[in-house]
Image (spheres, rainbow, N blue to C red):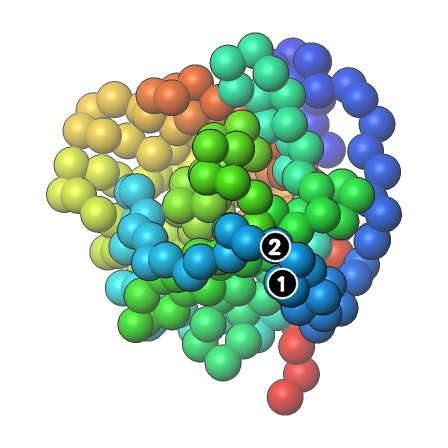
Amino acid sequence: MFDLGIIQNMRHPIRLHVMGASLLFVMLILSACSTVIENKKIRLITTPHVSAPLFLDHWTVAPFSLTQIIESEFQGKSYKVHFEVEWKDRQLTIVGLTLASVPIFIMRASKTGNEMQLFIPDNNVSSMMDPEWILSDFLLTVAPLGLLNSSLSSPALRVTAETPFERHIMRQNKMIARILYSEPNKFSSEILFQNFEFEYILSIKNIRFQEIKS
């Protein structure tokens, strides 16, 4: 565990209403909502910093499911969301929900490309964190360093591991982001992601991680 002054403003308690919910359960919620939500058009997306299709084509991690709570600090405001993540059959799926289990988006990424389905109006996405950046930041956080550096979107970018508890994302010789881990494990219980270019902070709590048995 780490206690950093930079997250001192994130002091509201988190209550997850669907703690440990499986992705299948969340998908059933989305299916039920799809008949009443008009803004559900699927669109293709790209990711900044990391080429998700290039990375996912070579990712060898065992299938898993992951429940996360994300607190973000951006432009003086704080937001909290709940993610259900699944890596299975060579596809990464991230479902974003409010803490009250209201669907925000579902995103799927594989070697063939990335697509996103929104369940809220487009003009509300920035305040709830852009899914394109969510996917990129997730990969920057959990990806093996060697594979990550070979999948970056620009030759000017580089990711370094200062210690097992810290990563730096560099553009040329300037650090544009820093990632801190509470344990020497990329799925550690707490992760702090600081983006210095766009001045936002993500405080990530990995609530439940489970390998999916075939």
Q: Mark 1 points at which residue?
A: 34
Q: Is mark 2 on a helix, strand or loop?
A: loop
Nearest the eye: 73 or 57:
73
Above or below residue 7? Residue 72 is below
Nearest the eye: 180 or 84:
84
Q: Name the residue under label 2.
A: 37
Q: What element carries label 1?
A: loop
Q: Is residue 63 left or right of residue 4?
A: left
Query: What is the x, y in percent for residue 49?
Result: 29, 42
Whether residue 206 is visible to the viewer of this picture, yes or no, is: no
Q: Which residue is drawn at 64% across and 21% down?
A: 78
Query: What is the x, y in percent for residue 10?
Result: 71, 20
Residue type of the residue flagged with mark 1? Ser
Query: What is the x, y in percent for residue 103?
Result: 66, 51
Nearest the eye: 20 or 37:
37
Residue type of the residue flagged with mark 2? Ile
Mark 1 Cα shell of 10 Å, populated few (<14), some (14-19), many (≥20)? some
Q: Which residue is drawn at 53% across and 64% down?
A: 93
Q: Which residue is drawn at 38% across and 32% down?
A: 168
Contact (Cβ within 8 Å) of mark 2 with mark 1: yes
